[in-house]
Amino acid sequence: MKALESIGYVTPKDYSAYVKFHVLKGKYYRLKSALIVFGLVLLGGGLVAYGFMSRAKGLVVGGGAILLCLLMFFYTINTNVKRICNSKAKTVRAKQHVVFGKNGFALDLLFQNEEENEHDEIFFDELEMVYDAKTAIYLYIEKRSVIIIPKRNLKISPEEARAFLVKYIPSQKLIICE
């Protein structure tokens, strides 16, 4: 089995995908989010349409409020991503190099100024949870501390990466998302 290695940048799009994932994390997070959005649009639009047909202003206002809350949710996510990227501007511009071994992984952040590079070694038993999502691997060190590894940066195929994770990470800490 080839070693799991990733080298590249974590972009604002990766942070955006992470924030959306984090809200509904779990095995079927994409299905959950699609069903919730579809249901809220259907409910809000239905209330507005029925309110106009029956001349009930309360239903129009209620449906409009549901749709407005849904729009505010997406606006808030985008604002949070911008805030995260601005607060971690140095980290966002750094090249991330992750090399996995049998017991853990080494994380190197390679900044533009080579004197400031950071190196950290983390063992698998220190991880809170690992999610293998569609576009990235999320390694939770604590509930609020995550390392994002975009799958496009992997030196091996996503299938080989998944096999590596299944082999070395305890099953109670690994969730493979559909």
Image (spheres, rainbow, N blue to C red):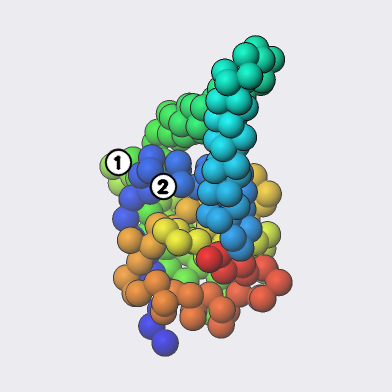
Residue appearing at x 56%, y 79% in the figure:
166
**Is residue 158 in view?**
yes
Question: In the drawing, does residue 142 fall left or right of residue 41?
Answer: right
Residue appearing at x 32%, y 70% in the figure:
155
Question: On the image, numbered disc 1 is attached to which residue?
Answer: 113
For the residues bearing labels 2 and 1, Cβ distance under 8 angstroms: no
Of badges 2 and 1, the one in the foreground is 2
How crowded is the residue under tag 1: few (<14 C-alpha within 10 Å), some, or many (20+)? few
How many numbered marks are there? 2
Describe the element under mark 2 as helix, strand or loop. helix
Describe the element under mark 1 as helix, strand or loop. loop
When asked about the image quadrant of residue 27, the answer is bottom right
Q: In the displayed image of the protein, which residue is found farthest to the bottom?
A: 1
**Residue 125, image x and y in percent?**
67, 69
Residue appearing at x 66%, y 76% in the figure:
170
Q: In the displayed image of the protein, which residue is found farthest to the front?
A: 54
The relative height of residue 77 versus residue 62 in the rendered view (above or below) is below
Question: In the drawing, does residue 89 fall left or right of residue 129?
Answer: left
When asked about the image quadrant of residue 28, the answer is bottom right
Question: On the image, numbered disc 2 is attached to which residue?
Answer: 14
Q: Which kind of residue does numbered mark 1 sit on?
A: Asn
**Residue 97: image tag:** none
Nearer to us in this view, 7 or 108? 7
Nearer to us in this view, 51 or 78? 51
**Is residue 117 in view?**
no
How crowded is the residue under tag 2: few (<14 C-alpha within 10 Å), some, or many (20+)? some
Residue appearing at x 67%, y 76% in the figure:
171
Q: Earlier along the polypeptide chain: callout 2 or callout 1?
A: 2
**Residue 18, image x and y in percent?**
50, 47
